[in-house]
């Protein structure tokens, strides 16, 4: 990794974005890829691990040799460097975390205003920010179909036969993530009526105890800001 200028403390925002870069790489390793796509992914990883070096440079070549042993090894290498990067800046994170949290909370709550008092819409908006934070087990299509069959049987409808879920495995997972995201919502009430939703500050604080999760949320805040900026151009 590139050496930081010792005379100038790095900005926490930049560190979080770097960590989130590793988060993005890890999510890509989880997908089926062609040999060409895998090579592109290894190239990105080698550049990030070596601090921006290119093919032929010592740091890059060393990282490349580690990454290309097999996909499992590559995944572990990226995890290792993400953990190393986070551990180097734990003190800085603890010192500046509250400012980052306030920024994240403000931006998320601004987005949630669009949902009004509709909890489902609020959960969908929040999912955009917490997608990498919430863990939902990945199921196969066969598992999702079997769950649907068991649901039909539990309703006392007798023989369920071969039932295919109306949802794909990915749609089911997204729905479960939205369900979990709704637990991070806090209702805003006026005269006993729900008028809107905000993110639960305490639950956000709990999630941000993990620096890699905080990096993911912050990264999505920045992505959203860029999307808005591009739309306004």
Image (spheres, rainbow, N blue to C red):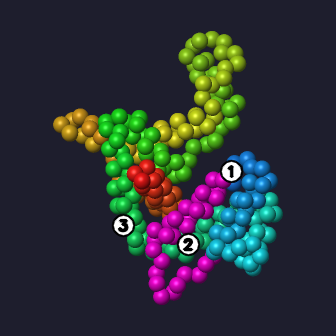
Residue range of the region highlighted in magenta in the rendering: 1-28
Report the magenta stretch's main SS. helix
Element class at badge 3? helix
Q: Where, by quadrant of the figure, is residue 59 drawn?
A: bottom right
Q: Please indicate, yes or no, whether residue 163 appears anywhere in the rendered image.
A: yes
Of the two numbered discs 2 and 1 in the rendering, the one whose residue sits closer to the viewer: 1
Please name the residue shown 36% across and 45% down the image. Answer: 112
Horizontal and vertical percent for residue 203? 40, 52
- Asked whether 97 falls inside the magenta stretch, the response is no
146, 196: nearer the viewer? 196
Instruction: Give me the disc on residue 99.
Output: 3
179, 131: nearer the viewer? 131
Residue placed under numbered mark 2 in the picture: 87
Distance between the alpha carbons at the discs numbered 2 and 1: 24 Å
Horizontal and vertical percent for residue 98? 37, 66
Q: Earlier in the sequence, mark 3 or mark 1?
A: 1
189, 21: nearer the viewer? 21
Please name the residue shown 70% across and 59% down the image. Answer: 41
Element class at badge 1? loop
């Amino acid at each position: 990794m590139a050496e930081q200028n010792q005379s100038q403390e790095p900005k926490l925002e930049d560190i979080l974005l770097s960590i989130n870069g590793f988060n993005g790489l890890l999510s890509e390793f989880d997908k089926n890829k062609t040999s060409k796509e895998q090579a592109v992914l290894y190239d990105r990883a080698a550049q990030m691990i070596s601090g921006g070096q290119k093919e032929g440079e010592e740091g890059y070549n060393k990282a490349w040799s580690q990454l290309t042993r097999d996909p499992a090894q590559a995944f572990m290498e990226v995890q290792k460097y993400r953990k190393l990067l986070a551990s180097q800046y734990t003190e800085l994170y603890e010192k500046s975390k509250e400012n980052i949290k306030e920024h994240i909370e403000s931006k998320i709550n601004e987005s949630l205003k669009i949902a009004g008092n509709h909890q489902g819409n609020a959960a969908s908006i929040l999912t955009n920010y917490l997608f990498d934070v919430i863990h939902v087990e990945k199921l196969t299509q066969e598992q999702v179909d079997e769950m649907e069959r068991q649901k039909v049987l539990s309703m006392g409808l007798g023989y369920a036969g071969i039932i295919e879920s109306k949802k794909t495995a990915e749609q089911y997972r997204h729905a479960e993530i939205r369900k979990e995201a709704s637990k991070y919502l806090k209702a805003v009430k006026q005269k006993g009526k729900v008028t809107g939703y905000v993110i639960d500050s305490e639950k956000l604080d709990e999630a941000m105890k993990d620096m890699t999760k905080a990096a993911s949320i912050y990264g999505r805040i920045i992505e959203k800001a860029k999307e808005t900026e591009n739309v306004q151009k």
